[in-house]
Amino acid sequence: MRPKFYFPIFLILISISFSEHVKEDSTKIEDEWLAFDKVQHFTYSLLWTLSTQYVLVNNMNMKEEDALPFSIISSLSAGIMKERLDMKKPKGYFSKKDMVADCLGIFLAVVVIKDNIPSRPVLGGMSKPN
């Protein structure tokens, strides 16, 4: 395994290491699915993933396929750290629904990115017959 694939694992471990246990009452808090906060989480994760992918590919000369895991993990780590920071507020809690909105934003970014990655040639360099 190449060393650059250890970096996403390192990011996840860092975000988990700064975490705390979930407060007991955080599961009893009513958190609406259709809230402006969820739109913010979705949009932030979408834009973070797309912009990270852009920087890695265009400024750091990584291949699209190699940059994608870094883009996903960095956005997911930011979402986890944000929720952990919310827990430290006096009435704060870890919102699983916010994390779902983050994941949906990342998913849409991956769909957009994958749509722009040129397909690999067929093995042996032969193309399909017309």
Image: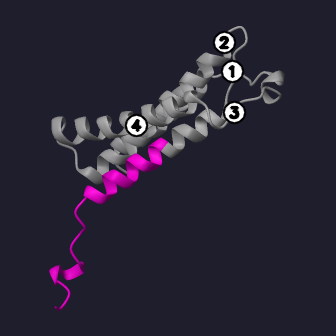
Q: Is residue 68 left or right of residue 82?
A: left
Residue tagged 3:
32
Q: Quadrant of residue 48?
A: top left
Residue tagged 1:
20
Q: How many marks?
A: 4
Q: Residue at x 59, y 20 (%)?
A: 18
Q: Are marks 3 and 1 in contact (CB under 8 Å)?
A: no
Q: Which mark is residue 54?
A: none
Q: Residue at x 53, y 43 (%)?
A: 103
| Circle 4 Cα neighbour tier, 10 Å, few/some/many (<14 / 14–19 / ≥20) | some
Residue 128 x %, y %:
20, 87
Which amino acid type corresponds to the residue marked 3 in the rendered image? Glu
Q: Quadrant of residue 96?
A: top right
Q: CA distance from mark 3 to mark 1?
A: 23 Å
- Under circle 4, the secondary element is helix
Query: Which-is-in-front pick, marks 2 and 4?
Result: 2
Which amino acid type corresponds to the residue marked 4 in the rendered image? Phe
Q: Are marks 2 and 4 in contact (CB under 8 Å)?
A: no
Query: Which-is-in-front pick, marks 3 and 2?
Result: 3
Q: Earlier in the sequence, mark 3 or mark 1?
A: 1
Q: CA distance from mark 3 to mark 2?
A: 21 Å
Q: Earlier in the sequence, mark 4 or mark 1?
A: 4
Query: Which-is-in-front pick, marks 3 and 4?
Result: 3
Q: Are marks 2 and 1 in contact (CB under 8 Å)?
A: yes
Residue 10 seen anywhere in this rendered image of the structure: no
Which amino acid type corresponds to the residue marked 2 in the rendered image? Lys
- Under circle 2, the secondary element is loop
Residue tagged 4:
7
Residue tagged 2:
88
